[in-house]
Image (cartoon, rainbow, N blue to C red):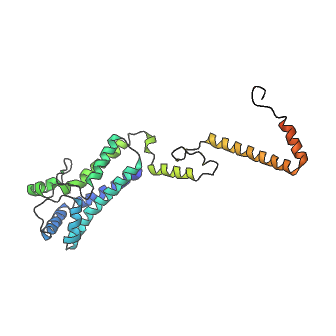
Amino acid sequence: MNEIKESLRNIEQTYKIFQQQQFTFIAALEHVRENAHDKIKPVSSIGQVQTYMDHYCNNTTDKRILLMFLNICCELHKLCQRLESLHPGNATTNAILEKCKMYVSHSNDLSGLRAKYPHDVVNHLSCDEARNHYGGVVSLIPIVLDCMKEWVAHTEKLPRNMLQSVSARKAAILQQINLPTRIKKGFDLSGRPTFVTEACQTKLSLVDRAQKRENRRAAKIKQMGGLGRAIQKFLDGPWKPPGKNAF
């Protein structure tokens, strides 16, 4: 969880630098939309910004700021994947995470997004820009950051045993599969390995040692030939039929 918080703080620091250059970002979008002859429709997705940069951006300043926006979105997408692998979650955290994943999807329509107080990114636009062109694209990152902070807050309230990493559980299963053969027999009907407790390991060890003693005794009797077979017959006692006289 500490690593998640650190990653989130790093993204926030990068976003603060980007936010200070919002006018440069809007100017860059104006230039590329003009080059693409696409100034009527609003900027409605991350994929659209990517297309503008790849095909219609012809100066270094515009490319730098568009790339900065796309890199932040990419880092948010990666962080969503890490959040998903951190723990199974509950209905609340899973709903927040699904919302984050939807927002950072390249094809998601973000034209209707509007960041609200305490964010002021929309206030820095003109009425026409905010309503018809850039209100959604400038609101995306602060809204996703807020959702991720909300996810962290809810997650920290969950029981500690729910915070076990999914990858750690996978590692435990792989370690279980690599146990010695006599221990690996503990598989359930679905083929998944059952976890071997300390008591179970002790029992397996005792059975193994008893089997080794029996093997040594059998080998010694075999070496003694006929005398050994006579001793074995004496130790085993006369044969008794099964039933009430068996004991």
Q: Residue furthest front?
A: 241
Q: Quadrant of residue 90?
A: top left
**Residue 222 spot, x, y in % from top left:** 84, 50
Give left or right: position of 56 versus 144: left
* 125 up-or-down from 93: above or below: below
Q: Quadrant of the C terminus?
A: top right
**Residue 2 spot, x, y in % from top left:** 41, 50
Pick the front one: 129 or 99: 99
Pick the front one: 162 or 190: 190
At x 80% / y 32%, what residue is drawn? 240
Pick the front one: 169 or 147: 169
* 181 up-or-down from 92: above or below: below
Q: Residue furthest top?
A: 244
**Residue 242 spot, x, y in % from top left:** 75, 31
Visible residue check, residue 175: yes
Q: Residue furthest left?
A: 128
